[in-house]
């Protein structure tokens, strides 16, 4: 059906390269690399490093990264898994012997090996066209000289100052006199500038085997964890075969498990069995179908997603049209399914997603995350970054595919996406929506807005969203202010437990970036989420 939606701002158009991120200074860093002749891979790493400086509330060298790279020469999508593994000395038996049945959010046992640094190097080595020192220089300058903190970043920095940073080992090093920087206040991070210079000069070995590794191991163990030097020294990224489905004559690509991109594809495949185009995007029936499809997708995702090297998922079966049809048949038209077991872990998290398309037709969809803001908040002293808490997503249920085990990767929430033409393989564009377990829900909702409702990238990001919440917090569905009151009322009558969300709490609906490329004119159209501080810039 015809649908008009007035966006809060216009999409950005360009032709010779574009960067979209959640922080203007990071977007500018990527654009600087493109202007110097760098391609999408090298520019993406510049953005990632700059976000480490300007948005440590979400990302950093103490976290993980995933990327999808579209090669214009090969017309092919490549998937990079930059997630880390549990320490070799950490096991379910060890937790049981200590009486731990559920890990606290910021416990040192939740720290997995930080994979971001290796991922940056591996992406640039395979696809980049500039030296690592050139790529990191914008971030080094920002960290050394200081930068004014953006408003939304300042808000979440303050929450962390009162939370994990207040109590974590060396957490105060990410504060100013014990407090978070205010919006517009200049923050210097000379420790991070030093870290970035070290890896620019000496490569990733200094992070995984040298003095940075020593500081990480010392901080983790001093805080009560169980890291060893070999945990870091033996870390590797992996290049994997991306997974995909056809949707509206497009091919939508995600990284395979241990990432949760599978959940987005499962939901979209289910929704192919309904005539969504005849339903208003914010209507009761449309949102009911989308919510139910997502609940069914999560039920499968949380059973099957785990470290694929130990527990590979039956991907061909799960992503088949026949299976999607069977799952779609379970959805009732006017009533919520009562017994879908989607068993979500706690959904609090922070991540940065960004994307780049270069003047050569390559694209990079990239996501980098600490998890839960500053992660554990534990800082290797003097190095300017905090350590993630990704291990909190391990199951502590024996024999579960995602059960904690030594050197195993956990279920991972961060997921980039890429779209190509289903017939000729040409690039359509990268997109993503960051934010914990909102991410596959955001991918599903944005893909529908783009390819069924035919909204432009900015409209698709501005449209109000829903977010299924975990069972542990009473299983409600967050509904963003802007969804019609009638829709809200009718969804509740169908049995959906709803909660209206507005203001700064809208962060629960994720923060997305989109760049689409017209196949005929090659004009780029970009959008940046209003729920973050960011923007799109173009050459």
Image (cartoon, grey):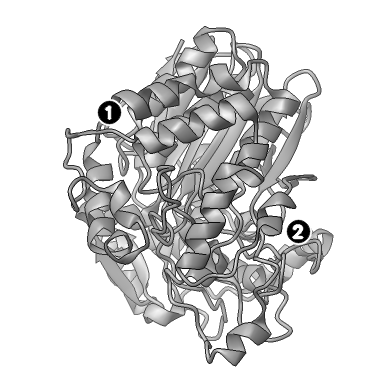
- Mark identifier at residue 298: none
In the depicted view, which residue is nearer to us: 102 or 282?
A: 102
Image x and y of residue 266, in percent: 66, 60
Please give the count of numbered marks on the rendered protein: 2
How busy is the neighbourhood of tag 1: few (under 14 within 10 Å), some, or many (20 plus)?
some
Which residue position is annotated with label 1?
147
Image x and y of residue 196, in percent: 50, 31
Residue pictured at 65% horizontal, 31% vertical: 203
For residue 287, above or below residue 213: below
Give the foreground label among 2 and 1.
1
Which residue position is annotated with label 2?
319
Residue 389 in view of the camera:
no
Image x and y of residue 252, in percent: 67, 42
Residue pictured at 75% horizontal, 36% vertical: 78
Residue pictured at 65% horizontal, 82% vertical: 92
For residue 470, above or below residue 466: below
For residue 344, above or below residue 514: below
| Secondary structure state at the residue bearing disc 2 | loop
Left or right, 443 with reference to 427: left
């Amino acid at each position: 059906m015809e649908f008009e939606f007035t966006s809060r701002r216009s999409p950005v158009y360009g032709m010779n390269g574009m960067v979209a991120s959640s922080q203007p200074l990071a977007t500018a860093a990527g654009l600087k690399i493109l202007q110097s002749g760098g391609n999408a891979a090298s520019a993406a790493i510049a953005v990632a490093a700059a976000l480490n400086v300007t948005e440590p509330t979400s990302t950093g060298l103490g976290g993980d990264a995933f990327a999808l790279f579209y090669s214009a020469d090969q017309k092919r999508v490549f998937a990079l898994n930059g997630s880390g593994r549990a320490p070799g000395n950490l096991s379910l038996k060890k937790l049981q012997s200590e009486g731990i049945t559920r890990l606290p959010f910021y416990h040192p046992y939740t720290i997995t090996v930080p994979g971001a640094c290796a991922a940056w190097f591996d992406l640039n080595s395979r696809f980049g066209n500039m030296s690592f020192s050139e790529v990191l220089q914008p971030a080094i300058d920002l960290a050394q000289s200081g930068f004014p903190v953006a408003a939304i970043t300042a808000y979440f920095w303050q929450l962390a100052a009162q939370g994990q940073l207040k109590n974590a080992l060396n957490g105060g090093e990410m504060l100013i006199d014990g407090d978070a920087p205010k919006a517009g206040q200049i923050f210097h991070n000379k420790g991070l500038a030093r870290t970035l210079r070290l890896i620019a000069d000496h490569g990733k070995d200094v992070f995984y085997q040298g003095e940075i590794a020593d500081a990480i191991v010392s901080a983790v163990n001093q805080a009560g964890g169980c890291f060893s030097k070999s945990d870091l020294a033996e870390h590797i990224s992996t290049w994997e075969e991306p997974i995909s489905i056809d949707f509206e004559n497009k091919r939508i690509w995600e990284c395979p498990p241990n990432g949760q991109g599978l959940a987005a594809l499962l939901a979209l495949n289910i929704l192919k069995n309904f005539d969504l185009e005849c339903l208003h995007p914010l209507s009761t029936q449309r949102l009911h179908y989308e919510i139910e499809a997502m609940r069914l997708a999560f039920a499968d995702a949380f059973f099957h997603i785990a470290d694929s090297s130990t527990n590979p998922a039956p991907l061909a079966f799960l992503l088949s049209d026949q299976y999607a049809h069977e799952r779609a048949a379970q959805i009732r038209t006017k009533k919520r399914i009562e017994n879908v077991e989607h068993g979500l872990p706690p959904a609090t998290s922070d991540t940065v997603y960004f994307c780049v398309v270069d003047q050569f037709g390559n694209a990079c969809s990239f996501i980098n995350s600490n998890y839960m803001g500053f992660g554990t908040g534990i800082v290797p002293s003097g190095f300017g970054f905090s350590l993630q808490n990704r291990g909190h997503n391990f199951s502590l249920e024996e024999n579960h595919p995602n059960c904690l085990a030594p050197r195993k990767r956990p279920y991972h929430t961060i997921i980039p996406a890429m779209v190509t033409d289903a017939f000729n393989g040409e690039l359509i564009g990268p997109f993503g929506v960051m934010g914990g377990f909102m991410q596959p829900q955001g991918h599903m909702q944005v893909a529908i807005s783009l390819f069924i409702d035919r909204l432009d990238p900015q409209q698709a990001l501005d449209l109000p969203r829903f977010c299924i919440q975990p069972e542990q917090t009473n299983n409600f569905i967050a509904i963003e202010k802007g969804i019609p009151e009638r829709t809200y009322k009718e969804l509740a009558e169908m049995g959906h437990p709803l909660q209206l969300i507005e203001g700064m709490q809208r962060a629960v609906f994720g923060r997305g970036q989109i760049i689409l490329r017209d196949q005929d004119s090659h004009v780029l159209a970009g959008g940046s989420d209003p729920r973050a501080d960011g923007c799109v810039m173009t050459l």
